[in-house]
Amino acid sequence: MDIQRHSTAWTAMSKADIVQHIISEYHCAHRVQLAELLAQSVELGNRVANTGHWPHEFHSILLKLYEDLLEHMLREEQILFPLILSNEFGRLYNEKGLALHNHDHHLHMLDQLAVMSSELAQIEPSGLLDAETQALSSAFRALLSHFSSELRTHIGLENDYLFID
């Protein structure tokens, strides 16, 4: 759901409904998407590494994002969201600050992955990759693009609608 196009709908929703939407639509999907991206990045890295064009930090950044995001989402589900719903403002201020900092860090990692994905796209038509590896690369980049778009929307929803007082 595009946040900008549905801003009136988000402001009309209760925080409990937004939290439920975030968990069911984003947290669950991100866990699955990240696991698939990691598996594909290992396979793709093994296939493309011999060309000299595989960005070696691709998998390590993706793994770091996976670890950070899983921890972040769990913290939201166990600490931040319950604080928001119970209006415990004392601890909420610090938890929101941490979440916003994490969001900025996650967006930075998405930007790094996007640059590497563009580099990967440039070698697909070069003839360095066989057809199967090209197909895997294309599927990986499509999943990464979808995941990135979804995570950016998720972060925007939290920052712009859930974390406001």
Image (spheres, rainbow, N blue to C red):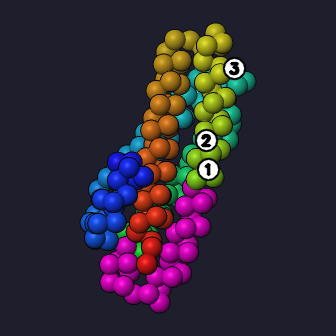
The x, y position of residue 164, in whole percent, is: 45, 73
Say whether disc 2 or disc 3 marks the residue closer to the N-terminus. Answer: 3
For this view, does 165 lie left or right of residue 57? left
Say whether disc 3 or disc 1 marks the residue closer to the N-terminus. Answer: 3
The x, y position of residue 144, in whole percent, is: 50, 37
> Can see residue 30?
no
| Mark 1 burial class by Cα count in 10 Å: few <14, some 14-19, many 20+ | some
Q: Secondary structure at mark 2?
A: helix
The residue carrying mark 2 is 113
Q: Find out whether the residues at labels 1 and 2 contact each other: C-beta distance under 8 Å.
A: yes
The residue carrying mark 3 is 51
For this view, does 85 lie left or right of residue 125? left
In magenta, the rendered stretch is 81-106
> Can see residue 41?
yes
Residue 108 is inside the magenta segment? no
Residue at image location 56% in from the left, 75% down from the top: 97
Query: Residue type at mark 1?
Result: Met
For this view, does 44 lie left or right of residue 3? right
Residue placed most toward the observer, 91 or 75? 91
Residue placed most toward the observer, 99 or 165? 165
Query: Residue type at mark 3?
Result: Thr
Q: Secondary structure at mark 1?
A: helix
Q: Find out whether the residues at labels 3 and 1 contact each other: C-beta distance under 8 Å.
A: no
Mark 2 to mark 3 CA distance (whole Å): 19 Å
Residue placed most toward the observer, 140 or 35? 140
Residue that lies at the very extreme toward the front in this rendered image: 8
The residue carrying mark 1 is 109
